């Protein structure tokens, strides 16, 4: 299962759509997580979503076969884990990504804490 994300947010504008040349400059990252073993993989500064997800999954899959990914670009991503669930999210910087991941995790459980964060170099 692969998570989806549009780092430009809800408002789509010309800067988000960009040309093929601008897209080539995006830096993609991903976090992979196994709910059963709590294995974590991450990646950053890849040239494509697929490359970022594949790199994060390769790390996570060394310890588990049920890894899920969450990808982002030109931003930070974070993973929060609690006793009854987890959440992954992105943000413009580490602090925002972590806050968003905690909120996402709290949909399932209240004892959430950040287990991993990673930022692209933009």
Image (cartoon, rainbow, N blue to C red):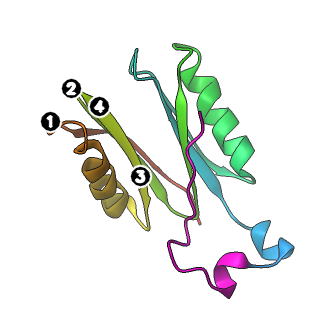
Magenta stretch: helix, strand or loop mostly: loop
Circles 1 and 2, Cβ within 8 Å, touching? The answer is yes
Give the mark toward the camera: 4 or 1: 4
Residue pointed to by mark 4: 85
Q: Residues within 10 Å of mark 1 (few under 14, many from 20)?
A: some
Q: Quadrant of the C terminus?
A: bottom right
Residue pointed to by mark 3: 89
Name the residue nearer the viewer: 41 or 100: 100
Q: Residues within 10 Å of mark 2 (few under 14, many from 20)?
A: few
Residue pointed to by mark 1: 111
Per the model, the C-alpha gap separating discs 3 and 1 is: 17 Å
Per the model, the C-alpha gap separating discs 4 and 1 is: 9 Å
Q: Earlier in the sequence, mark 4 or mark 1?
A: 4
With 27 as the anchor, is 25 left or right in this view? right
Q: Earlier in the sequence, mark 1 or mark 2?
A: 2
Marker count (numbered)? 4
């Amino acid at each position: 299962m692969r998570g989806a994300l549009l780092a430009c947010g809800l408002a789509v504008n010309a800067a988000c759509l960009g040309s093929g040349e601008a897209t080539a400059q995006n830096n993609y990252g991903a976090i992979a997580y196994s709910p059963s073993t709590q294995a974590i993989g991450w990646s950053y500064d890849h040239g494509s979503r697929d490359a970022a997800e594949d790199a994060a999954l390769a790390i996570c899959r060394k310890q588990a076969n049920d890894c899920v990914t969450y990808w982002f670009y030109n931003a930070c991503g974070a993973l929060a884990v609690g006793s009854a669930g987890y959440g992954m999210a992105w943000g413009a910087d580490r602090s925002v990504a972590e806050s968003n991941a905690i909120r996402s995790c709290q949909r399932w459980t209240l004892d959430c804490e950040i287990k991993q964060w990673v930022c692209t170099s933009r």
